[in-house]
Image (tube, rainbow, N blue to C red):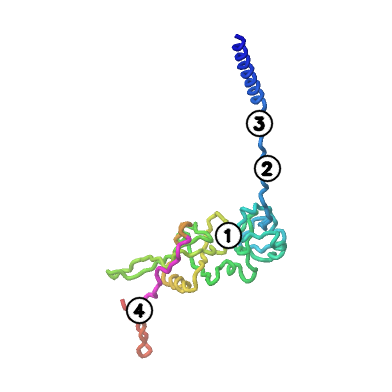
Amino acid sequence: MLRTLIVLGAIGSGGAAAWISTTMTASQPLPSVVVAEQPIPRVEILVADRDLPAGAVLRPGDLRWQSWPEELLLAGAMRRDAQPGAPEAFSGQMVRIALTAGEPLRADKLIQAQGGYLSVLLEPGKRAVAVRISVESTAGGFIMPNDHVDVLRTFSRQGPSGQSEMVSETILSNVRVLAIDQSTDTRNSETVLGKTATLELEASEVEIVTAGEASGLLSLALRAFADNAEERRIMHQPVAAAPTTIRISRGGVVEQVDLR
């Protein structure tokens, strides 16, 4: 009997000890682990202090240093630790591509302000040629500077039946528009109703466009922005129309002969 009581007492003591241990453990919160955040490395880069349109000549105060996460640094960005005198060095240079306030500046967006502004916009080896346009020949006037277009020529020719017929053909594809009249602002969302469009052409394309305008009416077809990366091509080379009449001089008398 005594042995039984001893066993029961031992079991009761063990249960009480376990209950007390569990209660004390539950009542005490586990220590929290604090993970220290690593600071993000930052550098200072040169950015535009205000909106700068293409063609603007940089003045003191147009540029400023801006703190920037180093891991998000763009290729070509100008760092203060590498070029501390950049704002002064670029003063007087011309902006080739429009910049918005806070946009990082790269050297390829600037050029020495020498010569006319349009020559600054031209890529090396390219030519600028102005052609006559109308609202009807420029997608209702919605073609803007820096858009890409196809150049079409509409002309009259003699049909199989001997009667004249109107024909259109694409002479150039994927041509960049530099300006509409004298507007080169690519950020202007308003329609520009101009009388001339200045196209950026290869040297070999200048004669094609000039001959096309002399022998017919040129129209511009607006291309989708996603197609701008396609290869530009010469589709047709306008051929001067054969003369339909000739003049023959006999003894001082000029006679006009119809060849049709």
Residue drawn 68% across and 62% down? 58
**What kind of element bears circle 1?**
loop
At label 3, which amino acid type do we have? Leu
Start-end of magenta stretch: 228-245
Disc 2, disc 4: CB below 8 Å?
no
Task: Please name which of the two marks, 2 or 4, marks the residue nearer to the observer.
Answer: 2
Q: Are marks 1 and 2 in contact (CB under 8 Å)?
A: no
Of all residues, the one furthest to the top in this rendering is 1
Q: Position of residue 195 (x, y in %)?
A: 51, 64
Measured in 3D between alpha carbons, the distance from the residue under mark 1 to the one under mark 4, in whole angstroms, is: 47 Å
Query: Which quadrant of the view contains residue 182?
Result: bottom right
Q: Residue at x 64, y 54 (%)?
A: 70
Quadrant position of residue 160? bottom left
User: Residue 133 vs residue 56: left or right?
Assistant: left
Is label 2 in a helix, a strand or a loop? loop
Label 2, label 4: how far apart the Cα atoms are: 92 Å
Say whether residue 53 is visible.
yes
Q: Which mark is residue 51?
A: none
Q: Quadrant of residue 76?
A: bottom right
Look at mark 2 in the image and give the residue it sits on.
36
Single out the mark in the foreground, 1 or 4. 1
Tell me which residue sits at (64%, 25%) in the image.
Answer: 26
Tell me the tag on residue 245.
4
On the image, numbered disc 3 is attached to which residue? 30
The location of residue 138, given as percent across then percent down, is: 47, 60
Nearer the observer, 219 or 127: 127
Q: Residues within 10 Å of mark 4 (few under 14, many from 20)?
A: few
Say which mark, if any, is on residue 185.
1
